[in-house]
Amino acid sequence: MRLISTILLLLISFLFFNCKNEITKPEITKQKSKKTEKQIPNVTDENFETFLAKFNRDSVFQISRVKFPLKVKEIDLESMAELDENKSEFKERTILKSDYTKLDFTYPKDALTRELDRYTQKIKIKKNITVVEIRGVDNGIYSDFYFEKIGGKWFLETWKEQST
């Protein structure tokens, strides 16, 4: 009887220590995976030029990177006729996702040499805000498109249309 109780005690001790080790192993694994998660950033810091190239060619991507409803400012041509030429008023227009049309900021090589609709395009990046400036050459084109980096990703926030 004594032998059976000793064997039983050893068996219970053996099971207890083996079960305890199995429980602690996943905890160690969890701690290691938490350290790994901290080292890998959740969002990459997107380069604007790379973003803009994809924005130009992929309409589904473009719609996913526009902040809707999009509020844009446009020059009010009716009020401009009543005011001085140097003063202009703006009206705000809201563009819903269903009314949005794809934009393309691809700058063609002949933009400055073509006979009609000549223009320049400059990209001004300041931290998390980027402005794409489009300026016509002797034709009244004048637009600014504002992009903002949110969570490491670029989004079209608004634009200001001053073309006459």
Image (cartoon, rainbow, N blue to C red):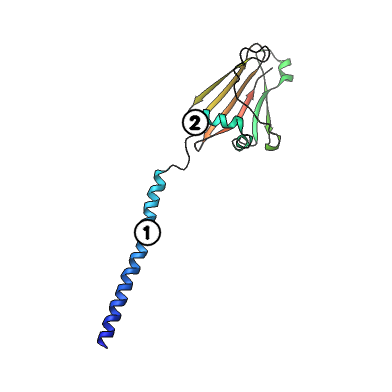
Vertical position of residue 110 compared to residue 97: above or below: above
Task: Tell me the quarter of the image containing the C terminus.
Answer: top right
| Viewer-side residue, 44 vs 159 | 44
Q: Is residue 121 above or below residue 18?
A: above
Q: Hey, what amino acid is under mark 1?
A: Glu
Identify residue for label 1: 27
Residue 27 in which image quadrant: bottom left
Whether tag 1 and tag 2 are in contact, CB under 8 A, the answer is no
**Between disc 1 and disc 2, whose residue precedes?**
1
Judge left or right: residue 108 versus residue 27.
Answer: right
- Relative to 76, 126 lies left or right: left
Q: Residue at x 60, y 38 (%)?
A: 64
Give the side of residue 22 with respect to residue 150, left or right: left
Quadrant containing the N terminus is bottom left
Which residue corresponds to mark 2? 47
Marker disc for residue 91: none
In the orientation shown, which residue stands out farthest toward the front?
109
Q: Position of residue 153 (x, y in %)?
A: 52, 36
Tell me where residue 67 appears, x and y as whole percent.
61, 36
As helix, strand or loop, the secondary structure at mark 1 comes to: helix
In the image, 143 versus 26, the foreground residue is: 26
Residue at (47% x, 38% y) in the render = 44
Q: Residues within 10 Å of mark 1 (few under 14, many from 20)?
A: few
The residue sitting at 65% across, 36% down in the picture is 69
Q: Is residue 147 above or below residue 37?
A: above
CA distance separating discs 1 and 2:
38 Å
Residue 161 percent location from the top left of the image: 65, 23
At mark 2, the secondary structure is loop
Q: Residues within 10 Å of mark 2 (few under 14, many from 20)?
A: few
**Mark 2 residue type:** Asn
Q: Residue at x 65, y 13 (%)?
A: 114
